Amino acid sequence: MELLPFLAIFGAMLLSRKLYNSKLLLLEADQKALLVELFARGSATYWVYGFLIVSIVLIMLNLEYQLVASSLVWIVYFTLAVVFMLFSTYRSISKLKHHAFPNFFVKNYMWVTAIRVGGLLLFILLTYLS
């Protein structure tokens, strides 16, 4: 039962990657190049790493000093993680639409993101229940 949450999130990530790659193959070469250029490491990467580092530091400080209840820390952490995922997805979809990517690719990107967020939520739920 303890392995089930990890299997759920791993399965969601594999499924989303498979769906994304299947539609990526349908893009033209110039669209693929533009995709790489649009989503190359930039400021968003720094936000992700910053979020992870600050989160880990705050969680470790809370474990040491018991400032607030541990359950509250995890609720806030996962809520912020989901909000961050949704915000970055919104920005990514806006970029794709702005650069006139095919509608099938944009819709697929939305589905892929929904699967990833669903996998994270399922991970949280199964972890909480076990």
Image (tube, rainbow, N blue to C red):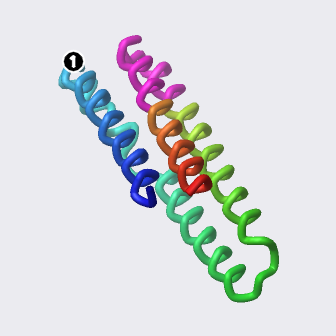
How many C-alpha atoms fall within 10 Å of the one at disc 1: few (<14), some, or many (≥20)?
Answer: few
Question: What predominant SS class does the magenta segment belong to?
Answer: helix
Residue 125 vertical position relative to residue 68 in the rendered view, above or below: above
Residue 28 vertical position relative to residue 54 in the rendered view, above or below: above
**Residue at the image position 25 percent from the left and 26 percent from the top:** 24
Q: Which residues are magenta?
A: 93-112
Which amino acid, mark 1?
A: Leu
69 to the left or right of 25: right
- Whole-percent x and y of residue 91? 56, 34
Q: Nearer the viewer, residue 9 or 44?
A: 9
Which quadrant, please, contains the N terminus?
bottom left
Which quadrant, please, contains the C terminus?
bottom right
Q: For the view shown, which residue lies furthest in the bottom direction? A: 64
57 to the left or right of 116: right
Residue at numbered disc 1: 26
31 to the left or right of 63: left
- Whole-percent x and y of residue 126? 54, 49
Q: Nearer the viewer, residue 7 or 90?
A: 7
Q: For the view shown, which residue lies furthest in the front direction? A: 1
- Whole-percent x and y of residue 85? 56, 43
SS of the residue at dot 1? Answer: loop
Q: Nearer the viewer, residue 56 or 42?
A: 56
**Residue at the image position 55 percent from the left and 56 percent from the top:** 127
**Residue at the image position 61 percent from the left and 39 percent from the top:** 87
* Residue 110 sits inside the magenta stretch: yes
* Residue 75 sits inside the magenta stretch: no
Q: For the view shown, which residue lies furthest in the top direction? A: 103
